[in-house]
Amino acid sequence: MNSYKIALIPGDGTGPEVINEGLKVLEAVAQKYNFKYETVNYDFGGDRYLRTNEILPESAIEELGTFDSIYLGAIGHPDVKPGILEKGILLKIRFDLDQYINLRPVQLYDERFCPLKGKKPQDIDFVVVRENSEGLYKGMGGFENKGTEKEVATQISYNTRKGVERCLRYAFDYTQKYGKKKQLTLCGKTNVLTYAFDLWERTFYEIAKEYPDVKTDYAHVDATTMWFVKNPEWFDVIVTDNMFGDIITDLGAMIQGGMGLAAGGNINPQGVSMFEPIGGSAPKYTGQNIINPLAAICSLAMLLQQLGEEQAAKSVEDAAKFVVRKKLKSLAAGKMGYSTTEVGDLVIKAL
């Protein structure tokens, strides 16, 4: 019997509420598919920071590195200045555990919840592979003459051959294994970002020679956003840099029905990965039992897939699809027709 050790970071706001529903589903699916797991809870987040003035203890990254996976609720607290927790917890974990892939499935479960006219589930079903450790998020740059009329601010997009190549290889492998059309699109801006995306494009087409069964194409990021709205059915797997990936995945979340279904993974294929709903802590809904837990539950499905529990992962995703299609009036907090805990119960019943 397989056994897994999972670190829990429920985090801030509604994070603990949605993680609780994910854990209910995990317990049910572990029984059904005959695997064991143990969890360890970490209180990293805004409340801890306000209480102790400590963002992450020194031992945190080393400890997290001993787990098979990390399951995160949300980070972001209304009483903590924006950026402190995000950089100190989210980015630190991603960078220090070398989670160099951000994986974002974009899948429409029910056309009732799609803001695009005439689009059906088969039209919106693609995955974005975002480089997660370099680019503009590296934090390189600074100010000159800050606070004066001659002020200059620079932010450097830092791209290494190693970082670009390993992201692209992951995307090609993912397309080969899971792509419905076996088609990989590089999203960039080669006409303006002539250094960074020269490196991305050259490396992309060099690696493509090793994958003759994968169709390749290229799209500028601005064109990609247009086609997400007009022709989302064109896409299968998209690979892009950190900044563009951050932007297009939020647009992807909207066309799939909203943040209530937006699941994501921060992947280290050779190490420890972290899975989370991407919608944030939603503090205005805290404690009301009305937040949609399905993004957290779909993140759990991604976690299970990464651990190799493919059947369990598929059953969780299928159960979430069933609940969306057959039970919910809306995907928005407070409008689902069910409470947070009731939606978790519906998913377990659908398993």
Image (tube, helix red, strand yellow):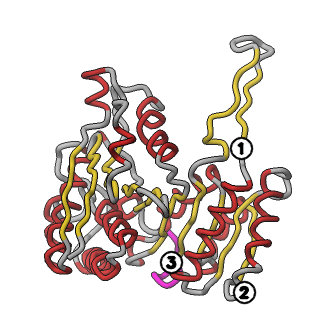
The image quadrant of residue 257 is bottom left
| Disc with the residue nearer the chain's start (2 vs 3) | 3
Where does the image place residue 314, in percent across and percent down from the top left? 33, 80
Q: Is residue 259 left or right of residue 9?
A: right
- Secondary structure, mark 3, is strand
Front in this rendered view, residue 168 or 348: 168
According to the picture, the residue beneath numbered tag 1 turns out to be: 158
**Counting other residues with Cα less than 10 Å from the Cα at mark 2, is it few (<14), some (14-19), or many (20 or more)?**
few
The image quadrant of residue 109 is bottom left
Reply above or below: 49 against 11: above
According to the picture, the residue beneath numbered tag 2 turns out to be: 212
Q: Are marks 3 and 1 in contact (CB under 8 Å)?
A: no
Disc 2 residue type (three-letter): Pro
Front in this rendered view, residue 195 or 252: 195
According to the picture, the residue beneath numbered tag 3 turns out to be: 125
- Per the image, is 293 magenta? no
Where does the image place residue 62, in percent across and percent down from the top left? 38, 42
Which image quarter holds the N terminus? Answer: bottom left
| Disc with the residue nearer the chain's start (1 vs 2) | 1
| Disc with the residue nearer the chain's start (3 vs 1) | 3
Please give the range of residues in magenta: 115-124
- Secondary structure, mark 1, is strand
Disc 3 residue type (three-letter): Asp
Disc 1 residue type (three-letter): Tyr
Q: CA distance from mark 3 to mark 1?
A: 31 Å
Q: CA distance from mark 1 to mark 2?
A: 30 Å
